Image (cartoon, rainbow, N blue to C red):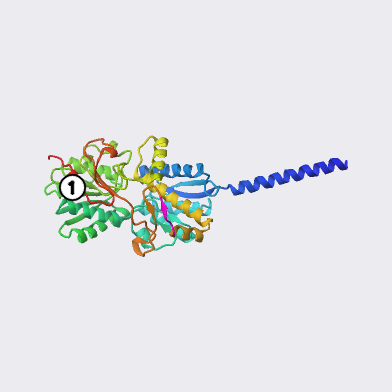
């Protein structure tokens, strides 16, 4: 009986040791939870939300297939904001308090980012903004907020430089009634005063929930401007573009149509914009002909394999957002907020589009990647793929006006 008892004790001890070992292994492999706020249902831009989601999922898989972060897999916890500030606040609150995420990323609409980051700031959790262009996001000066994506002052400089190169005299912008739309429209005006002070500029604010923009468009028929600028997101942007074209205003021999929102690589662009897109000049954050680091090709190939779609700028912005978080966690050897924020501030990472660093200057430059590469390209035919469009301005080079095409009438 004593022998049996001793054997039972040994077995129990071995079983206990095995359980402890399993427990330690499971704990070591516990996932690192990253919160994601995106639009997955209207009234926000669902197309943007889908592209960001795909980009984050592709990148998380690449990280995890390579062993995760120090052996721990990345787990994305996704919340739908519908592009609404109140939904964004609630989503960030849930992700931090209930899901216990170590950082937030994914946001792609400025008004939602401005709301969500307030909650992240209150809880002192890193917030890496993917695509909210509003400069107000950085002007708050929050330690928690970082932006490896584009920003309004950057777009404003690009638009002003293009208008100057085109030699236009009168410019009208149509801006959606959001922080993004109004903010960028104002920045474009300020940049035109700096770079092309002789240009007469005004912007019209349009309700993004509307489907009829003719009251603002019809007055342009009698005296069309030299350029019309889109500062709106879908679906409102598509409606506005079609109505501007149907009224014979732009694109035309008289008037350039310039998309400051970078819509031409959206998968539903040509489904919604036909002849109105032919001749469109586009501010872009990606073009297949631009040079990219190896990580950009790896992410792009993985995205195409997953979705059967061509890479787009939101894919790379989303990828870089997650890559900088993963890199900071690895360097900090911690997911504690202070350590993670310090590591993010010291970022020097070659991502999908170039070497990412964050400025420590105050104002709109705070925690902003200042050297975001951009291009200008022109669509010269209906249903034209971005890869076949005319690349008229590459990163670091001036616009080549000799490559531009204009309708005969």
- Mark 1 residue crowding within 10 angstroms, few (<14) / some (14–19) / many (20+): few
Local SS, label 1: helix
- Residue topped by disc 1: 401
Q: Quadrant of the N terminus?
A: top right
The answer to whether any part of residue 358 appears in the image is: yes
Quadrant position of residue 134: bottom left
The image position of residue 290, as x and y in percent, is 31, 45
Residue 214 as seen in the image, left or right of residue 76: left
Where residue 169 appears, as percent x and y from the top left, is 14, 54
* Residue 325 forms part of the magenta stretch: no
Q: Nearer the viewer, residue 288 or 119?
A: 288
Quadrant in the picture for the C terminus:
top left
Q: Looking at the image, is 228 positioned above or below residue 121?
A: above
Residue range of the region highlighted in magenta in the rendering: 346-350
Judging depth in this view, the residue of 103 and 346 nearest the camera is 346
Question: Which sits in the foreground, 375 or 40?
Answer: 375
Tally of numbered tags:
1
- Residue lying at 15% horizontally and 59% vertically, measured from the top left: 198
């Amino acid at each position: 009986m004593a022998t049996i008892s001793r054997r039972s004790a040994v077995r129990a001890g071995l079983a206990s040791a095995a359980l402890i070992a399993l427990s330690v292994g499971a704990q070591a492999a516990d996932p690192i939870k990253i919160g994601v706020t995106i639009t997955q249902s209207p009234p926000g831009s669902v197309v943007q939300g889908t592209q960001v989601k795909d980009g984050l999922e592709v990148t998380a898989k690449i990280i995890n297939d390579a062993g995760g972060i120090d052996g721990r897999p990345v787990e994305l916890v996704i919340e739908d904001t519908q592009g609404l500030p109140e939904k964004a606040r609630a989503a960030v609150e849930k992700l931090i308090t209930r899901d216990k995420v170590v950082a937030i990323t994914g946001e792609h609409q400025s008004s939602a980012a401005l709301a969500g980051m307030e909650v992240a700031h209150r809880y002192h959790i890193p917030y890496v903004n993917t695509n909210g262009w509003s400069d107000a996001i950085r002007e708050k000066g929050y330690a928690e907020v970082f932006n490896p994506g584009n920003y309004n002052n950057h777009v404003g400089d690009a638009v002003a430089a293009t208008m100057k190169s085109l030699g236009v005299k009168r410019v009208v912008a149509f801006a959606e009634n959001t922080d993004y739309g109004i903010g960028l429209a104002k920045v474009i005006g300020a940049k035109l005063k700096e770079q092309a002070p002789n240009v007469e500029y005004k912007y019209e604010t349009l309700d993004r929930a509307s489907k009829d923009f003719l009251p603002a468009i019809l007055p342009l028929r009698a005296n069309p401007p030299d350029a019309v600028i889109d500062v709106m997101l879908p679906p409102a942007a598509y409606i506005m573009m079609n109505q501007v074209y149907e009224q014979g205003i732009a694109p035309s021999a008289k008037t350039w149509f310039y998309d400051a929102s970078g819509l031409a690589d959206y998968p539903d662009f040509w489904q919604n914009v036909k002849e109105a897109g032919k001749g469109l000049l586009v501010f872009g954050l990606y073009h297949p002909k631009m040079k990219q680091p190896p990580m950009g090709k790896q992410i792009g190939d993985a995205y195409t394999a997953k979705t059967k779609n061509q890479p787009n700028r939101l894919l790379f912005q989303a990828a870089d957002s997650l890559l900088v978080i993963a890199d900071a966690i690895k360097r900090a050897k911690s997911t504690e907020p202070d350590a993670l924020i310090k590591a993010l501030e010291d970022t020097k990472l070659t991502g999908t589009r170039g070497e990412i660093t964050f400025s420590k200057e105050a104002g709109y430059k705070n925690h902003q990647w200042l050297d975001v590469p951009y291009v200008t390209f022109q669509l010269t035919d209906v249903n034209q793929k971005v890869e076949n469009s005319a690349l008229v301005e590459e990163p670091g080079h001036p616009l080549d006006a000799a490559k531009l095409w204009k309708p005969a009438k």
